[in-house]
Image (cartoon, grey):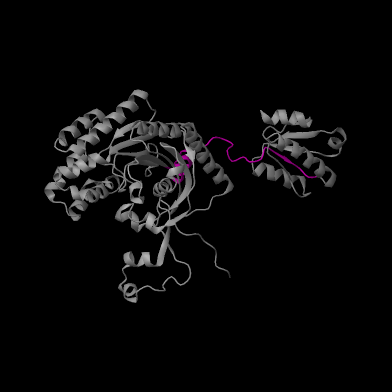
């Protein structure tokens, strides 16, 4: 007996109904991207490993899916290296390419390669899958889609405000209540200085970024394990657990980071972004969260993360400012800021809350039954005219029993059935049955177009 086929853990198949829901998400996000003046690009699924490595921190590098070289990938590799079991050193010898971990680093590579063709500030969006060798769990997949919008070539904090407005608009249209969490990497650098460990900023950010998952006590324990003293951890703790209103937190931060120039700069940037956003107004809750780090090394300024308020799930959108990302590819002085929507998590949220509009999975407006060759030929002619008018229509391909044909329309929630029999052939009409009410009307093609176009 043949083994039952399966798919890799952390990946999913999607049925037609599920794809209709996913396309609703993609179409909603895409329409808002266009509304805000972003243009679409695409990049390859795989990048040179040298492009990807070192951009996501130690944790991120471990999650890169690496692609073995074609042919004899072990040819020329030192046997002692293989026997040592040192996969970190071995991987670059046998893998030259990897699947993209996100869309931001490939975008930075794109900007560097095409800089002569781009008009800065350049606003791009991208909707493509990414891959991470992560442990699959609820809301976390190994293959998933990201929907990114980035602005490069401008230092203005107005860009951050625009992206917050864009986030708010997307989730307003989807009907998801959200909180937008905001922090600044410079504030985190200031916290590292406050702790007397500026060289430990990566260790600090990786640890405190887990506070929602593992709790404060475990974060403090991890900080000590990463080489911080008990005294340093004691200094960090009150900063990452600030309470009060946003303005009160800003005041406390300003006081706590008074001796850190970079920390104070981060506080000023936070204050400007939040002030502009508040003056314009958004539906979402805007929340200053000093524990927000997002654990990616390339962020240098604002950090943004979005949480759904009515579903327990990880972040459903996030991003931030990166001043140095294109510099690693040889293009210095180009600042960028961007956000990414996690389409798969948004899909799970909409499923949980039942927020999809009615009828989005309906692909056919009217199905014609098949009574024989002459009736089918006439039906196909009518269907062609309906399709030209923008109405989706199909013919049942076989001359099956009426019950079976009508059953298909009922199962697929097709709202109308077209019937062409002997009388309809003689009159040049179609009997149209409303599958909801059961009512039937004998109509001309023009009348059907008028009826179904409403």
Q: Position of residue 149 (x, y in %)?
A: 43, 39
Residue that sits furthest to the front in the current view = 116
Of residues 168 and 103, the one nearer the viewer is 103
Magenta region? 341-370
Which residue is at a point 75% across and 28% down the rendered structure image? 447
| Residue 377 shown left or right of residue 279 in the figure | right
* Left or right of 340 in this view: 367: right
| Residue 290 image point, x, y percent | 25, 39
Q: Single out the residue that lies furthest toward the left.
A: 231
Quadrant that contains the N terminus? bottom right
Instruction: Find residue 276 and report its image quarter.
Output: top left
Residue at screen point 43% across, 70% down: 73
Is residue 366 a member of the stretch shown in magenta? yes
The residue most toward the top is 279
- Quarter of the image holding residue 69? bottom left
Whether the magenta-drawn stretch holds residue 164 is answered as no
Residue 10 lies left or right of residue 233; in this view the side is right
Q: Residue 203: give x, y in percent of width and height.
A: 23, 51
The x and y percentages for residue 452 are: 69, 31
Q: Can residue 354 be seen in this view?
A: no
Report the quarter where the C terminus lies.
top right
């Amino acid at each position: 007996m043949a083994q039952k086929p399966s798919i890799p853990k952390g990946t999913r198949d999607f049925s037609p109904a599920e794809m209709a829901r996913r396309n609703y998400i993609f179409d909603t996000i895409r329409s808002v991207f266009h509304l805000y003046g972003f243009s679409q690009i695409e990049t390859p699924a795989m990048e040179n490993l040298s492009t990807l490595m070192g951009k996501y921190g130690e944790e991120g590098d471990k999650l890169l899916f690496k692609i073995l070289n074609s042919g004899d990938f072990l040819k020329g590799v030192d046997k002692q290296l293989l026997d040592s079991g040192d996969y970190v050193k071995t991987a670059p010898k046998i893998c030259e390419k990897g699947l993209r971990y996100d869309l931001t680093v490939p975008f930075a590579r794109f900007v560097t390669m095409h800089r002569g063709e781009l008009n800065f500030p350049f606003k791009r969006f991208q909707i493509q899958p990414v891959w991470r060798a992560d442990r699959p769990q609820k809301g976390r997949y190994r293959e998933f889609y990201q929907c990114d919008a980035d602005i490069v070539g401008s230092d203005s904090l107005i860009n951050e405000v625009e992206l917050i407005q864009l986030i708010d608009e997307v989730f307003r249209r989807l009907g998801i209540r959200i909180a937008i969490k905001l922090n600044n990497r410079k504030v985190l650098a200031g916290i590292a200085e406050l702790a007397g460990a500026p060289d430990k900023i990566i260790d600090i950010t990786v640890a405190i970024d887990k506070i929602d998952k593992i709790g404060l006590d475990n974060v403090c324990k991890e900080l000590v394990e990463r080489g911080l003293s008990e005294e340093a951890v004691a200094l960090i703790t009150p900063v990452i657990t600030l309470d009060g209103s946003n303005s009160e937190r800003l005041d406390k931060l300003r006081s706590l980071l008074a001796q850190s120039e970079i920390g104070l700069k981060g506080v000023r940037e936070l204050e400007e972004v939040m002030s502009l956003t508040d003056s314009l107004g958004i539906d979402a809750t805007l929340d200053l969260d000093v524990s927000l780090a997002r654990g990616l090394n390339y962020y240098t300024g604002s950090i943004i993360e979005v949480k759904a308020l009515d579903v327990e799930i990880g972040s459903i959108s996030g991003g931030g400012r990166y001043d140095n990302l294109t510099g690693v590819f040889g293009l210095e002085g180009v600042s960028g800021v961007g956000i990414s929507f996690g389409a798969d998590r948004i899909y799970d949220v909409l499923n949980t809350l039942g927020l999809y509009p009615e009828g989005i999975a309906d692909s056919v407006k009217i199905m014609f039954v098949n009574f024989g060759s002459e009736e089918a030929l006439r039906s196909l002619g009518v269907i062609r005219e309906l399709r030209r008018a923008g109405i989706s229509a199909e013919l049942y391909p076989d001359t099956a029993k009426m019950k079976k044909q009508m059953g298909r329309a009922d199962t697929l929630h097709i709202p109308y059935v077209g019937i062409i029999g002997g009388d309809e052939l003689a009159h040049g009409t179609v009997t149209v049955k409303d599958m909801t009410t059961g009512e039937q009307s004998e109509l001309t093609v023009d009348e059907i177009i008028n009826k179904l176009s409403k």
